[in-house]
Image: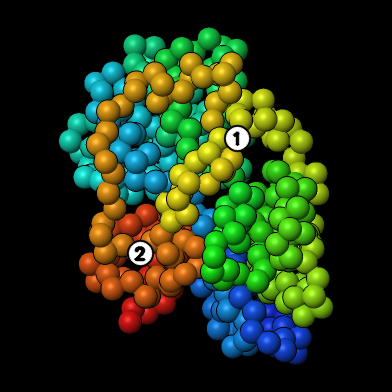
Amino acid sequence: MRFVDEWRDPEAARGLARRIAERVTRPWRIMEVCGGQTHALVRFGIDRLLPEAVTLLHGPGCPVCVTPTATLDAALAIARRPEVVLCTYGDMLRVPGTERTLADAKTAGADVRIVYSTLDALALAESLPDREVVFLAVGFETTAPGVAIAVAQAEIRKIVNFSAIVAHVRVPPALEAILAGPERVVDGFLAAGHVCAVMGTAEYAPIAARHRVPIVVTGFEPLDLLDGILACVTQLEEGRHEVENRYARAVRDEGNRAAREAVLRVFEPVDRTWRGLGDIPHSGLALRAAYRRFDALERFAPQVGASRDAPECIAGAVLVGKARPTDCPAFGKACTPDHPLGATMVSSEGACAAYHRYRSVG
Ligand code: SF4
């Protein structure tokens, strides 16, 4: 397959792994931020190609996984309203809320629908003027532009029966939170290429400088990842801590200006709670005052009690690199993709799902 096969060449991969081994003189811990990268690393066995001194840690880059249970509970409460059609991406249907999932709610009669883009939800709102169409918007800077454009379109086209539960999160504050903890577990980051394709790389420079940590922008294919790891290890061995773009075929330092401007026009940064990381200042996006009438949480003011996760689930520790999925006693036993106890076993980008799919249990 053109443009993919050349990034999966086994001989080239072994060559990069050899160069990493030659470069390493001491242990280093490198965190890949993105769940898509986690899946590729586990799927292609890249962690097993690396020298023992290089430990890969899986980060919080799965948007479904870091969405807190309280947000799911609010979405469930809104979905129960008879006038509401609740739309979201497919993965979100199976993420456990405190008592149930959106799929359970659908089975019980709620009008919950999977859409592939926010604009599909907007079109649904136009076609169903007597219903309230609510989009559950999760994701990083990659999906935020689409939601921003849909909200701006709703404003222009006066579509009053559309609103969104905005649960978007931003990557840079999460990196700060991971580095700021008392026990620092990360020496270098592989930053997610698609996030940087939208937002550019400027936000990462102060983090690299402040925490003296290399941040290497990396793609998603095996050679992208190995090349990123080699660049990160090289910086660490040379005592450098720079933002380095190794995904230049997709990422420009300034990002995608149109997408960035759409996000900035509609959203503003707010403090947000992450599963696993807790409250992180300025780590979320919320609708600006001019667009707040499209905020479903303000429109419906859902009443929810205290949210709870499954007590045996250690997804919070998995999401910050402090535990591996296989450290969880429920992994592959009480918790499987068919009966997930936590979001990291549901999502196509979740670390637990990746280990379950590509690594034998036990
Ligand atoms: S295996 Fe299941 S219960 Fe364990 S951390 Fe992962 S999602 Fe949670």
Which residue lies at the image location 60% right of the left edge and 20% below the top edge?
A: 152
Amino acid beneath label 2:
Ile
| Residue drawn at 39 percent across, 18 percent down | 299
Circle 1 residue = 269
Query: Looking at the image, which is closer to me, 257 or 292?
Result: 292
Q: Distance between the Cα atoms at labels 1 and 2?
A: 28 Å
* Quadrant of res 102: top left
Q: Does mark 2 have its CB less than 8 Å from ligand 1? A: yes
User: Label 1 sits on what residue type?
Assistant: Pro
Quarter residue 353 falls in:
bottom left
Q: Residues within 10 Å of mark 1 (few under 14, many from 20)?
A: some
Instruction: Say left or right for 315 vs 280.
Output: left
> Residue 356 location in percent, x, y?
37, 70
- The answer to whether residue 304 is above or below residue 17 is above
Q: Can I make out residue 10 in this image?
A: no
Q: Furthest-left residue in view?
A: 108
- Tell me which label, 1 or 2, sits earlier in the chain: 1
Which quarter of the figure is the N terminus placed in? bottom right
Q: Which residue is mark 2?
A: 314
Tell me: 124 left or right of 56: left
Which secondary structure lies at badge 2? loop
Please identify the quarter of the rendering in which residue 18 is found. bottom right
